[in-house]
Amino acid sequence: MPELKTRWDIFCTVVDNFGDIGVTWRLARQLVAEHSVAVRLWVDDLRAFERLCPEIDINVSQQWQEGVEVRQWSADWQPTDAADVVIAAFACQLPSAYMDAMAAREKPPLWMNLDYLSAENWIVGCHGLPSVKYKHVQKFFFFPGFQKGTGGLLRENGLLERRRQFQQSPQAQREFLQGLGVDRAEGALLISLFAYENTGLASWLDTLAGDSAPTHLLVPEGRILGDVERWLGVDGLAAGAVHARNALTVQVLPFVRQDQYDPLLWSCDFNAVRGEDSFVRAQWAGRPLLWHIYQQEEDVHLDKLEAFLERYVKGLSQPASEAISGLWRAWNAGETMTDHWQSTRKHWPELQKHAEAWCLEQALQADLAAALVQFYVNWI
Ligand code: TRH
């Protein structure tokens, strides 16, 4: 008799942007590909999903993508049986009929809340703890993180090896970039820019334009384009646009599918990223990065920024640590970037080495999908 696969349900509400679906789609695929479990991914907004995975048919309520059963999570919930493992991503509220279905199972499911990523220390104490109960079904906290005792980070099998091969092959990089219409100018520093609106951008672009060395800036279509337009003094920037200002070439890219975003990060010397998933992917790229953190009420995101920086700069010399921290703080405050960028460039080789070392250190932890499966195994 074939062994019955464990069934997992992942619930995702798209609050805004792409991080919620970005994380859950990545996790769902990895669980299927590497842990042979059956996954249903319930998503309330297939339009956001379609940007990451253009094969998604937004008019279909049930479809299979890369082995994952994708279900439209509509307001009008149809009765369905509960899975063995239930993940509510980012504290989303499950349909009440589904919670009843969980409680009606002979053996209740393992129910977890997959939380937001944070480098703060308190998450170690909370990871894996019981949370609320619905009837007799216990919910658990599951915290991704950068340190031992957390749920780790999403990292597919062989990711770093694929990245290394790509970065060692100028031809693979050239072909990939050419596919996006990018012809990298000889000797230019290649930077990708994915960020929220940012008043500090103009000063950074001024600095890059006035530099003695050339920079080629790649900007996937998104929220930062308005600031780029204002700086360039043009309207209606769209994918394909290329504008040169002194030493700086700005090129707008299409928003690439999620599996193409990795090679874009791997190709660049420096990546400006945001939110959660792109932030983690830039770390796996092994290159220096700049994080635009997702803003939260009462500025609690600033504590998260500092918690990450405190961890990240360990092992850097004092001046390099101050340079990169200063750059990140200025970016997240929307302040002038000039001096911070210049100081960062002074410590470039050290920051490059450090980015690779940080990546390897993080890869020593179990990845998040494996940690979830292990949590389930320990729980049974
Ligand atoms: O889009 P984000 O800002 O997402 C979020 C959400 O706002 C969420 O509500 C919030 O809680 C979280 O941030 C912290 O940034 P993030 O997380 O990096 O997600 C972006 C996704 O888009 C990621 O999976 C990478 C992907 N992406 C592409 O697939 N193609 C692209 O061209 C780019 C630029 C990104």
Image (spheres, rainbow, N blue to C red):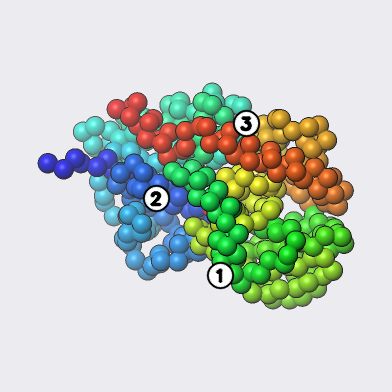
Ligand 1 lies under 8 Å from the Cβ of mark 2? no
Query: Which image quarter: residue 44?
Result: bottom left
SS of the residue under disc 3: loop
Residue 255 occupies quadrant: bottom right
Foreground residue among 306 and 171:
171
**In the image, residue 180 lies at what x, y percent?**
58, 69
Label 2 or label 1, whichever comes before in sequence order: 2
At 69% from the left and 40% from the top, the residue drawn is 353
**Could you tell me how far apart the alpha carbons at marks 3 and 2 are, in whole angstroms?**
28 Å
Residue 179's label in the rendered image is 1
Give whichever of discs 3 and 2 has the lower sequence position.
2
Closer to the camera: disc 1 or disc 3? 1
- In this view, the residue farthest toward the top is 125
Find residue 233 and report its horizontal and vertical position in percent: 80, 73
How many tags in the picture? 3
Q: Residue flagged by tag 2: what amino acid is it? A: Arg
Image quarter of the C terminus: top left
Whether tag 2 and tag 1 are in contact, CB under 8 A, the answer is: no
Mark 2 sits on what residue? Answer: 29
Q: Position of residue 211 (x, y in %)?
A: 86, 59
- Provide the residue designation for mark 3: 120
Q: Can you tell which quarter of the image residue 283 is in?
A: top right
Tag 3: residue type?
Glu
Q: Residues within 10 Å of mark 1 (few under 14, many from 20)?
A: few
Dot 1 amino acid type: Gly
Whether label 3 touches label 2, CB < 8 Å: no
Element type at marker 2?
Answer: helix
